Amino acid sequence: MKGRKPVEWTKLDNAAKIFPPTSNERDTKVFRFVCELRDEIDENILQEALDKTMPLFPFYQTVLRRGFFWYYFESTELAPKVAREYKLPCSMLYHPNRRNLLFEVTYYKNRINLEVYHALTDGTGALAFLKTLLYYYITLRYREDFKDRLPVLDYDASITQKMDDSFLKHYTGKRIPKKVKIIKAYRIQGRRFMDNRIKIIEGVMPVKEVLELAHKYDTTLTVYLTALFIRAIYKEMPARSRRYPVVISVPVNLRAYFPSVTARNFFATINVKYDFAASGDKLEDIIKEVKECFNRELTQKKLQEHLNKLSALEHNAFMRMVPLILKDTVLRLANRLNDRQITAALSNIGRIAVSPELEPYINMFSCFTGVKRPQIALCSFKDKLVVSFSSPFTGTDIQKNFFRFLTDENVPVVISANIKEI
Amino acid sequence: MQYCPHCKVKIKGQHTVCPLCAGILEGDGDPKEEVFPFIPTIYQEFNLFIRVMILISIIVVVACFAINIIFTKESRWSLPVAAGVLCMWISLFFIIRKKNNIPKTILWQVGIISILSVIWDKSMGFAGWSIDYVIPLICVLAMIVMAIGAKILKISVRDLIIYLLIDVIFGFVPIIFIIFGWLNVIFPSVICVAASIISLSVLILFEGDNMKNELKKKMHI
């Protein structure tokens, strides 16, 4: 009889729990990783590479379903199919009541695109998947070059380690009671596209020159670009909104602070606040403030507190007994409250490294997210820094300000965009 | 590559104006450099049919009220018509919303039709037809439709089992009607309970493990 084989199922990790109730056409919670190769992509080989990658990430072969109390992932027989890019970037991947995989691999010209629903994994997890896919693709495509010796895949994790729910593992249960005060942040307004498409502007620049600029202000790349972003937003702020602080939400990869190699979600977000009414609009001041904020928030102790706070909710006996329908409403409300405190977001994936044998075939990496507020995503590969600006609004003033700050400092920037009409 | 002298950036692909400042560009674009395919805007018109149906419903209801007021002031026949249309839309709403999960849709319909029939019966003086016929028969019907439908549409047992189980449990409700002697006609309820007992036995005997796993999965806290 059919269905004799027991079906595997997994709970959602802590960070993933917020995504299913809050994702919709406007805010799809989907992000994309792009790898641009030197040559055009071959569909058949990419499919073959994907088929080889799947067994290493069994967790990706799942659909998201609703239980009575929680959502859960259920393993499925659906096989992922490679396709030429055919739909809008970062469009919906999870549809309630529909069963489909929560990620998608597409290609366009030289680019391999991996789109992932955030409930499945975060940027680091998706990158591990993409790197494995690339490894297989390149070694298959350029078989002759690797006749003598296959390169090693640098992602070393057992399947249990990849499936590990690191939130659960590092939750200590200690709770510091803290009153949450909601500070309303400035929120960017603008006209949206009719079909909720996002505007992606991707700027490629040399890492070295931007780093030098950051060092000139005696700070790191992330801090420098965050400060530039805050300033770019400020320039477009209406005067009467200036009493609200600009708050940038920055996701932090917790794997850097807690031992974990999970291919699932393991991140927390910190909010970087800057109040123009109190602190002035000089870049030096912004950098100083942002730097202090990073130093204050990015400590093991603070992040442990953060993690405990996030996890406490799901360990709360009362919360667990509430039916999912009510949970959905509560989480949507919580999300709305949280949104009020955020102006924009910036995520830094950091330097992406692949095995040196594979490097010559790869041109660059890029990443961006489906958003309901402007967001910057950065990543670098070798000497190229890619700053991707995604925004749901038709206007491009913040983007213009941001990139002009850089070009005014004589950083050569190459732009590409997905939408031509303004 | 094109160049924007105001933003001082180079631009990949072929643009008419600078994507940042909408200024005039220098140089010629090369469509070969494009990194995103052009995706046309798709206007969501799939629900046009539903919109037309809603409009027709509104016209029918309004027309009934108008005729009722003008010609037959003493009777209130338009109210049941309006209520009927409303019930149809309540039922349709859940069908459309859950359309991707057929067993779930069927189960919801059992619930909705049961509740609506009791309301109708009550408002028409409670002749008892809702609990005599509608509730027991719709339970049995749902069981049959789920079993046959699953075979035809190749829905796996696992995906069906929970909904079938809930329907079967709901099928025991007519026992209450029988015990309290609320019924005028007893045979539909007896059939319903009998069918439920047999179905439950089949489920436990042949799909017991599946059912246990499925319950564990669906009800995890």
Image (spheres, rainbow, N blue to C red):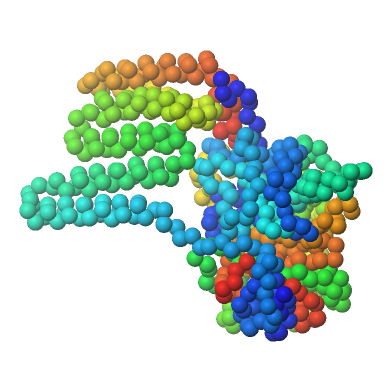
- Is A171 left or right of A194, judged from the image as shown? right
Q: Does residue A317 appear in the picture of this structure?
A: no
Classify the position of the C terminus of chain B by image quarter: top right
x, y percentage for residue A326?
Answer: 51, 45
Relative depth, front residue between A44 and A20? A44
Observer able to see residue A419: yes
Residue under the image location 73 percent in, 67 percent down: A387
Residue A154 lies, with reference to residue A86, above or below; the image says above
Is residue A48 depicted above or below B195 in this figure? Answer: below
The residue lying toward the viewer, choosing from B44 and A344, is B44
Relative vertical location of residue B47 with respect to residue A172 in this rendering, above or below: below
In-image side of A80 versus B103 (left or right):
right
Residue A161 vertical placement versus B133 (above, below) = below
B128 sits to left or right of A305? left
Residue drawn at x 63%, y 26% is A6
- Quarter of image, res B176: top left
A298 on left or right of B205: right
Q: Position of residue B42 (x, y in %)?
A: 49, 60
List the single residue furthest toward the right: A148
Q: Position of residue B181 (x, y in %)?
A: 26, 20
> Which percent across, then down, holds residue A224?
79, 72
- Residue at horizontal 67 percent and vertical 75 percent from the top: B29
Q: Quadrant of the N terminus of chain B?
A: bottom right
State the image quarter where residue A66 is shown.
Answer: top right
Q: Nearer the viewer, residue B210 or A278?
A: B210
